[in-house]
Amino acid sequence: MPNVSNLVKTIQDIMRKDAGTYGDAQRLEQLGWMFFLKIFDDREKEMELVRDDYRSPLPQHLRWSAWAADDEGITGDALLDFVNNTLLTKLKALTGGGDKIAGLIRMAFEDANNYMKNGTLMRQRVDVIVTNPPFGGMEEDGIESNYPAEFRTRETADLFLVLLMKILKPGGRAGLVLPDGTLFGEGVKTRIKEALLTECNLHTIVRLPNGVFNPCTGIRTNLLFFTKGQPTTHVWYYEHPYPPGAKSYNKGKPIRIEEFEGERAWWGSGKDFFAARVENEQAWRVSLDQIKAGNFNLDLKNPHNPDTGPGDVDHLLPEYERLLAQIAETRAQLKAQLMEALTR
C-alpha cells in the first residue's frame, strides 16, 4: 500500500527515542509483533461481522483493541508491565485445544521480545502527518483490493488520501499536497471527498500557483489541512500568490518558505476553530452546503479575483477591427517588398 513506508518511518522515529530499541534489528522485531496483533485484530473484527459463530482464539484482554486501540488506555510503567509480564508471556503459552490459529499465534510469538523501555512512547499513535504523496501515477493491479469497494481506484494520490483518513487517530491532524484533479474529479473521487468531509474537518485548502513542482511536473497542486473526528462545516481557501515580478516558478527560481508569511499571519489557531480568520483578496470561506450543492467539487476559484470573461462587445469590436487593419497593412507591405524583390 502506498504509505506503508511513511508509516513505518514515523513509528521508527518514535522508537529511536527509546533506549531499548537502539538498532534496526530491535526496531524491526518490535514492529513485527505489534503489526501482527494490529492486523490480526482488524481481521477478527471482519470475521465477527460475517460469522455469527466466530470465536477469537485470544482472551479478550490480550486483543489489540482491548489494550492498544484505546487512546485513554494504560500507558507508562503499567503498559510495560502488561506487555512484558502478561501479553507476551501468555501469547507464548497460548493453548486452544484443536484451534490451529491459536497454535500459529503461539509459534509466531515463541521468540518475540519487547525491547522498548518507555511505555509512554509505546502508547504513541500517528497523530500528525505532513506529506507529499506521489500524484499522477497509477498503482499496480490488485493494490486497490486492499481498500473498501466504494473507494477502489488505481490512482496513487486518491488511495493515499483514503489511507491517511484511516490511520489517523481521532483528533489527529494532516497536511498534504494533492493535485487539482482530486479536487474536481468525480466518481470515486467524489465518494472519497464526501467521506473526507464527513469524517474529518477539512478546514483549509491553500491553492498553489502554476509551476511549484517545475520541472518535474506542471500539474497544479494544493495544500489540504484537516483534523480527524469532526465533520466539516465550512472550508477556508487561501490563494497563494506569486511573489512580485514573478509569473511562474522553475528550478532556478523555486517557491520559497518566506513566501508563506501571508498565510502564517492569517492562519489563526485551531483551538478556537480559526475564529480570527477574515476574508481578504487571497482568502474566502465556502460552506458545506455550497460544496454539497456542487457535488463535492472542491476546485473553487477565488471570488475576490473573478475571471473577467470575454469582455464587453462594444469595447472588443473596435479593438478587433483595429487588429484586422494592422494585419492588412502588414500583408500589403510584405507583398510590396516581395514584388520589388522579384522585379530586380
Image (cartoon, grey):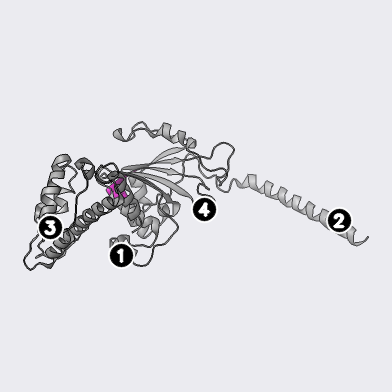
- Residue type (three-letter) at the residue carrying disc 4: Cys
Choose mark 3 or mark 2, whichever is in front.
3
Marks 1 and 2 sit apart, C-alpha to C-alpha, by 70 Å
| Mark 2 lies on residue | 337
Asked if marks 1 and 2 touch (Cβ < 8 Å), the reply is: no
The answer, for residue 227, to whether it is visible in the render is no
Residue interval drawn in magenta: 196-203
User: SS for tag 3?
Assistant: helix
Query: Tag 2, which secondary structure?
Result: helix
Q: Which residue is mark 1?
A: 145
Asked whether disc 4 touches disc 1, contact meaning CB atoms under 8 Å apart, the reply is: no
Which element is circle 4 on?
A: loop
Splitting the image into 4 quarters, where does residue 109 fall? Answer: bottom left
Of the image marks 1 and 2, the number of the one nearer the N terminus = 1
Q: Distance from label 3 to label 2 (Cα)?
A: 97 Å
Instruction: Determine contact: label 2, label 4, CB under 8 Å.
Output: no
Q: Is residue 258 left or right of residue 192?
A: right
- The x, y position of residue 148, in whole percent, is 28, 61
**Residue 64 shows in the view:** yes
**Amino acid type at image mark 3:** Lys
Q: Earlier in the sequence, mark 2 or mark 4?
A: 4
| Count of marks placed on residues | 4
> Where is mark 3, residue-wise?
92
Residue that numbered label 4 is attached to? 216
Q: Residue furthest right?
A: 344
Identity of the residue drawn at 92% across and 61% down: 343
CA separation in Å, label 4 and label 3: 51 Å
Q: CA distance from mark 1 to mark 3?
A: 33 Å
Query: Disc 1 residue type?
Result: Ser
